[in-house]
């Protein structure tokens, strides 16, 4: 095992890798709670049951997708990078695809499956570099920041801090409401933990908030801590049903936009995470990422597996940097993280104490982390600033990640051509311009 993961060459040992793997798990364990609540649309009242995914099944799918994805990354790519269903992508899945576009969640899972398969093909054929190079870096950064604002907006909604206002669209909620006060407490405690550099601050913030909620009677105390693993049957294989039974819903411009959005966000989120974590661990060689193809292959396989199990896109987690900071340098740390996700399956009864006000602080803080990309955008160049800004602002204001991406990708060629920089635009960007223009003409 030591030789396989090259412990001596990388100056590590079992203890450092185990602590690193555990630290990564604690830093991203919040997804076990956030993902089921997001995909089941628990915070949206009066929805038909057919629009809601089974939270117990999603919990199991989340844990298994994270475990399998992290295991593949650790054993094949040998990187200390863990995977799980991504925050932002799950929000797009639930609030845009299901709630706004009214696409059945089974068909949405098929979209995730298709995006994963395309990701695998791009990785195996080497086309991934061409696509990465075709999208201007400013738009990649804008998408990340926009998603950060979007999930922060959702977090404020779930907390009851922001509510619907017919006069001005949104307004300030009732800050004396018990659940809202609980969420505000959660935000404060999580900010304090993160500011102090506590590993797993988001996760521990949720735990502390949930405990306080039980103490003051806002949350029911669970009857048990360890219980039987929920059934995966409600979601397992649902992604395959539309392929065989309802193909008419799959071949539409709307579905193409959904698949492209899943693919785009996962593709560049993964690339950014790989480079960031590898740099932190000093694993880059001549400014290149060794075994990059294997890492991207692991990520795309995890997306395919997750879709079949019944969850939104599985992607590499930047929280892996916490494990690297704790000493992780090899894929063995990812194997350890995978083991903890499997162990977490036994604690499903705790899900009932994790309510929307408890998860809201996690969404808000993750949003804070994601908007750091704003500082890397060249705002002095108007032809760049316009599509970047519109991408970012349109996501929360239209309640749609896909719409934000579409607006930015439509305006980018226009501003660049008007500035006389049309030759700098990659042909793939023109293709995306046509696709997203058709999206607005026929679907919006």
Image (tube, rainbow, N blue to C red):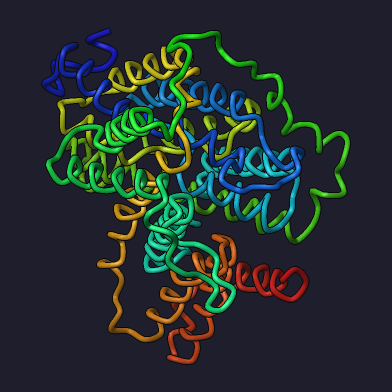
- Labels in figure, total: 0
Residue 4, percent from left and from top: 29, 13
Residue 32, percent from left and from top: 45, 29
Q: Residue at x 23, y 29 (%)?
A: 323
Q: Residue at x 72, y 26 (%)?
A: 237
Relative to residue 296, is residue 64 depicted above or below?
above
> Relative to the observer, which residue lies in front, 372 or 149?
149
Residue 432, percent from left and from top: 61, 67
**Left or right: where does residue 248 sit relative to residue 292?**
right
Quadrant of residue 153 in the image? bottom left
Residue 289, percent from left and from top: 30, 41
> Relative to the observer, which residue lies in front, 237 or 276?
237
Quadrant of residue 81 in the image? top left
Q: Quadrant of the N terminus?
A: top left
Relative to residue 168, is residue 32 depicted above or below?
above
Q: Residue at x 53, y 44 (%)?
A: 90
**Left or right: where does residue 240 sit relative to residue 136?**
right
**Left or right: where does residue 408 sit relative to residue 326?**
right
Q: Quadrant of the C terminus?
A: bottom right
């Amino acid at each position: 095992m030591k030789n396989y993961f090259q412990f001596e060459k990388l100056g590590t040992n079992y203890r450092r890798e185990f602590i690193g793997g555990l630290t990564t798990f604690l830093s991203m364990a919040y997804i076990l709670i956030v993902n089921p609540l997001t995909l089941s649309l628990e915070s949206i009242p009066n929805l038909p049951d057919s629009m809601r995914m089974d939270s117990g099944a999603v919990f199991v799918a989340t844990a298994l997708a994270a475990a399998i994805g992290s295991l593949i990354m650790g054993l094949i790519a040998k990187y200390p990078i863990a995977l799980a269903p991504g925050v932002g992508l799950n929000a797009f899945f639930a609030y845009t695809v299901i709630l706004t576009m009214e696409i059945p969640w089974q068909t949405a899972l098929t979209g995730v499956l298709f995006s994963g398969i395309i990701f695998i093909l791009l990785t195996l054929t080497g086309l991934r570099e061409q696509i990465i190079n075709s999208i201007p870096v400013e738009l990649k950064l804008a998408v990340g920041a926009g998603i950060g604002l979007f999930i922060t907006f959702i977090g404020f909604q779930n907390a009851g801090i922001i509510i619907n206002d017919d006069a001005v669209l949104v307004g300030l909620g009732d800050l004396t409401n018990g659940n809202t006060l609980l969420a505000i407490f959660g935000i404060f405690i999580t900010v304090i933990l993160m500011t102090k550099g506590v590993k797993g601050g988001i996760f521990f913030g949720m735990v502390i908030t949930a405990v306080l909620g039980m103490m003051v009677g806002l949350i029911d105390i669970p009857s048990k801590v360890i219980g039987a693993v929920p059934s995966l049957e409600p979601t397992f294989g649902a992604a395959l049903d539309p392929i065989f039974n309802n193909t008419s819903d799959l071949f539409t411009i709307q579905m193409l936009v959904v698949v492209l959005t899943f693919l785009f966000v996962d593709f560049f989120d993964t690339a950014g995470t790989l480079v960031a974590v590898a740099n932190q661990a000093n694993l880059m060689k001549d400014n290149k990422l060794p075994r990059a193809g294997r890492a991207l292959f692991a990520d795309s396989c995890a997306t395919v597996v997750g879709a079949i199990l019944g969850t939104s896109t599985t992607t590499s987690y930047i929280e892996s940097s916490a494990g690297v900071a704790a000493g992780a340098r090899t894929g063995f740390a990812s194997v350890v993280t995978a083991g903890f996700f499997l162990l977490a399956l036994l604690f499903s009864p705790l899900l009932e104490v994790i309510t929307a006000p408890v998860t809201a602080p996690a969404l808000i803080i993750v949003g804070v982390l994601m908007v750091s990309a704003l500082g890397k955008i060249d705002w002095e160049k108007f032809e760049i600033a316009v599509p970047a800004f519109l991408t970012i602002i349109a996501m929360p204001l239209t309640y749609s990640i896909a719409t934000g991406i579409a607006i930015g990708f439509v305006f980018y060629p226009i501003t660049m051509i008007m500035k006389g920089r049309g030759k700098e635009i990659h042909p793939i960007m023109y293709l995306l311009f046509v696709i997203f223009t058709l999206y607005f003409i026929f679907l919006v």
